[in-house]
Amino acid sequence: SMAVKVRVPSPLMKLTDNKSEVMAEGATVSDILNNLESQFAGIKDRICDESGAPRRFINIYLNEEDIRFLDGEGTIVKDGDEISIIPAIAGGIL
């Protein structure tokens, strides 16, 4: 399975031992999120809703591209890819 770097936003760093970047493994974004959960209990619940899809106010980027414009949480990842989890600015459009 593929190892990717995940950039963690400040509000979630209390769940990742205060690391802003962590490594996770999986074939898709969904696998990566499940792998993150296995490493850092409770993190997936903050990122995803009950159906496993990213919450509306969370943007997930794969190498600078919003996964909403790719295949969502089913987007395939490759070794060396970088995933960024970015909370949308509260109440506003940038």
Image (cartoon, rainbow, N blue to C red):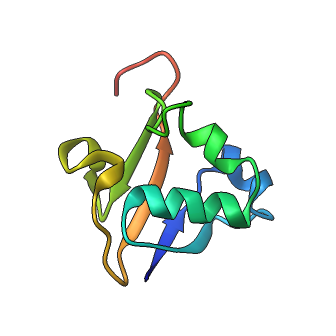
Residue shown at the point (28%, 65%) measured from the top left: 76
Q: Quadrant of residue 30?
A: bottom left
Image point (59%, 65%), residue name: 35
Q: Residue furthest top?
A: 91
Q: Position of residue 32 (x, y in %)?
A: 49, 64
Left or right of 18, for residue 7: left
Q: Position of residue 85 (x, y in %)?
A: 49, 51
Q: Is residue 70 left or right of residue 39?
A: left
Vertical arrangement, residue 48 with respect to residue 26, above or below:
above
Question: Which of the pair 67/88 is nearer the observer?
Answer: 67
What is the residue that sits farthest to the left in this orientation?
Answer: 69
Which residue appears farthest toward the front when viewing the image?
51
Q: Is residue 89 above or below residue 42?
A: above
Residue at the spot 35% in from the left edge and 22% down from the top edge: 93
Q: Where 89 sits versus 91, above or below?
A: below
Q: Where is residue 25? Give x, y as percent.
A: 51, 75
User: Residue 47's quadrant in the figure?
Assistant: top right
Determine whether 11 is above or below 80 in the image.
above
Q: Is residue 56 left or right of residue 68?
A: right
Q: Nearer the viewer, residue 93 or 54?
A: 54
Q: How many marks?
A: 0
The quadrant of the rendering that contains the C terminus is top left
Residue at 59%, 51% in the rendered image: 9
Q: Indicate the quadrant containing the N terminus: top left, top right, bottom left or bottom right.
A: bottom left
x and y percentages locating residue 11 in the rendered image: 69, 43
Q: Is residue 30 left or right of residue 78?
A: right
